[in-house]
Image (tube, rainbow, N blue to C red):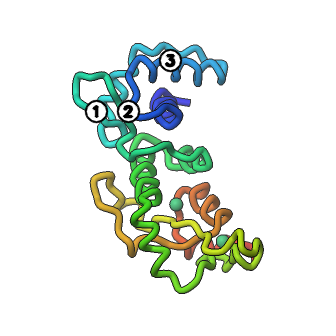
Amino acid sequence: MTLFEMLVEALSQLPQPAHIDAIKERVKEIAAAQGIERKTFSVRTVLSQNKDVFKNVNPGSGMWALAAGGPLPDVWDEGLNDLGEPEGKRVLVAHLRAERSRKLVAAFKARLPNFKCTACSFDFEVRYGELGAGFIEAHHIEPVSKLKGDKAPDLNQLAALCSNCHRMIHKAGLISVEELKRRMQL
Ligand SMILES: [Zn+2]
Ligand SMILES: [Zn+2]
């Protein structure tokens, strides 16, 4: 695990924005949990070298946050690894930001004719009854090469996926829904 990854992880776990001292402490804990001894003197450097991923809240205050907002769900860890770094990580953060935008996802779901997975047709309501009614995940389909952290997420770039297909698409390194369908054993 690189220091960059540990910083994303640390900020995901801490209430944001977090002070650099708290971030350093958390990085130490994350490193220790993995049996790595990690010197934290370069934390500030890595934070300031990745401005599209980390933002310095009130410059000079020592307060940092993930540019993409709230915590990154750990369910995407494999996606993080598959995309390589550092550009892949930035792409993924932009991707997750689009998927986490509550307004965007609510507007997207309101337009859906049904809540079936577009890759495998799984329907949560059919399987789980009332509990699954209206449940589907929004996946950002814009080609990875075009994703930039500074672009506003686009409603037309979301695809409805069940949790399994969504996870697999990330595990494969953000392939297209069509490619996922091709790889699916039906
Ligand atoms: Zn599916
Ligand atoms: Zn996704």
Apparent side of residue 80 relative to residue 90 in the rendered image (left or right): right
Contact, mark 1 vs mark 3 (Cβ under 8 Å)? no
Check the picture and name the quadrant holding the N terminus.
top right
Residue position marked by numbered label 2 in the rendering: 17
Mark 1, secondary structure of its residue: strand
In the rendered image of this protein, does residue 33 appear above or below residue 5? Answer: above
In the displayed orientation, state which residue is furthest to the bottom: 113
Check the picture and name the quadrant holding the C terminus.
bottom right
Q: Residue at x 51, y 22 (%)?
A: 27
In the rendered image of this protein, does residue 155 appear above or below residue 9? Answer: below
The quarter of the picture where residue 101 lies is: bottom left
* Mark with earlier residue (1, 3): 3
Q: Residue at x 46, y 56 (%)?
A: 100
* 10 Å crowding of disc 1: few (<14), some (14-19), many (20+): some
Mark 3, secondary structure of its residue: helix
Apparent side of residue 172 relative to residue 108 in the rendered image (left or right): right
How far apart are labels 1 and 2 at the CA level? 7 Å
Contact, mark 1 vs mark 2 (Cβ under 8 Å)? yes
**Quarter of the picture for ligand 1?**
bottom right
Apparent side of residue 12 relative to residue 87 in the rendered image (left or right): right
Residue 161: x, y in percent?
Answer: 59, 70
What amino acid is at disc 1?
Val
Residue position marked by numbered label 3 in the rendering: 25
Residue 62: x, y in percent?
Answer: 31, 22
In the rendered image of this protein, does residue 76 appear above or below residue 128? Answer: above
Of residues 130 and 179, which is closer to you in this image?
130
Residue 94: x, y in percent?
Answer: 39, 53
Mark 2, secondary structure of its residue: loop
Q: Which mark is residue 57?
A: 1
Residue 110: x, y in percent?
Answer: 47, 78
